[in-house]
Image (cartoon, rainbow, N blue to C red):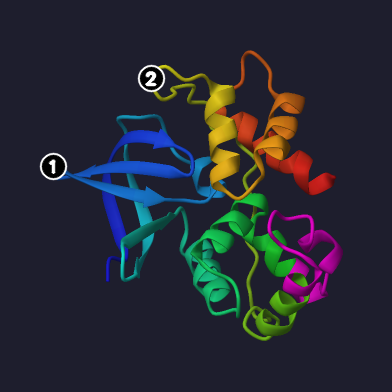
Amino acid sequence: MIGRIRGIILEKQPPHLLLDVNGIGYEIEAPMTTFYSLPEIGKEIQIYTHLAIRDDAHLLFGFASENERRLFRTLLKVNGVGAKMALTILSGIESNDFALCIQQGDTERLVRLPGVGKKTAERLIMEMRDRLKDWQTTPISDSAASDKSTHPGRGPVDEALSALIALGYKPQEASRYVHAVAKDDMSNEQIIREALKASIKK
């Protein structure tokens, strides 16, 4: 099991990340809450990982903190929740806020997350309440990434659209949220952050 990786950031195309570790490129999928804390391309980072082995692929997921990885793994134990939905949930809400929703039985806020309907929200609360009852919250950083680098030939808006679609939003929904918040001086990660906030408030 690969539990932690330290390497140089080669590419950032949310929700995908490419790290150079001694000449080997590791492709990692990460929630947007992790992307917000990443430095610019070319910098070294240390990231906590979860390896998922399937018949057709080995998938590596990365997280900025052990708490975030713990929550991801707890989500995977819920009936009907796969890795993609877990990643989407973590992208749409801070881990501390999610734990609070579970503890308080706040289905209203949970159903605002992409891919989470009323039945799924109720199942999340029912199956995770005991597992998260001792969750210790930590201060949440509200700092946004300032990196403005994008994939060659693509602008921040296109990057943001692709990221939201990869996270489970329908193309029309992604376009609506992105264009509602996008400004000329915003990076792709800042656009994604604001678009996700807008979708949750809807």
Q: How far is the residue under mark 1 from the one under mark 2?
A: 22 Å
Looking at the picture, tell me which residue is in the foreground, 123 or 55: 55
User: Can the viewer see residue 189 in this picture?
Assistant: no
Q: Position of residue 23 (x, y in %)?
A: 13, 42
Single out the mark in the foreground, 1 or 2: 2
Kind of residue sitting beneath label 1:
Gly
* Mark 1, residue position: 23
Q: In the figure, residue 131 lies in which quadrant?
A: bottom right
Q: In the figure, residue 194 lies in which quadrant?
A: top right
Looking at the picture, tell me which residue is in the foreground, 139 or 70: 70
Q: Which residues are magenta?
A: 101-120
- Residue farthest to the bottom, as pictured: 130
Tell me the element at label 2. loop
For the C terminus, the quadrant is: top right
**Which residue does the image show at 73% across and 34% down from the upper left?**
177
User: Can the viewer see residue 165 in this picture?
Assistant: yes
Compared to 133, does 56 lie above or below? above
**Which residue does the image show at 27% across and 50% down from the upper left?**
6
**Which residue does the image show at 53% across and 68% down from the upper left?**
82
* Mark 2, residue position: 152
Kind of residue sitting beneath label 2:
Pro
Compared to 168, does 56 lie above or below? below
* Disc 1 + disc 2, Cβ < 8 Å: no
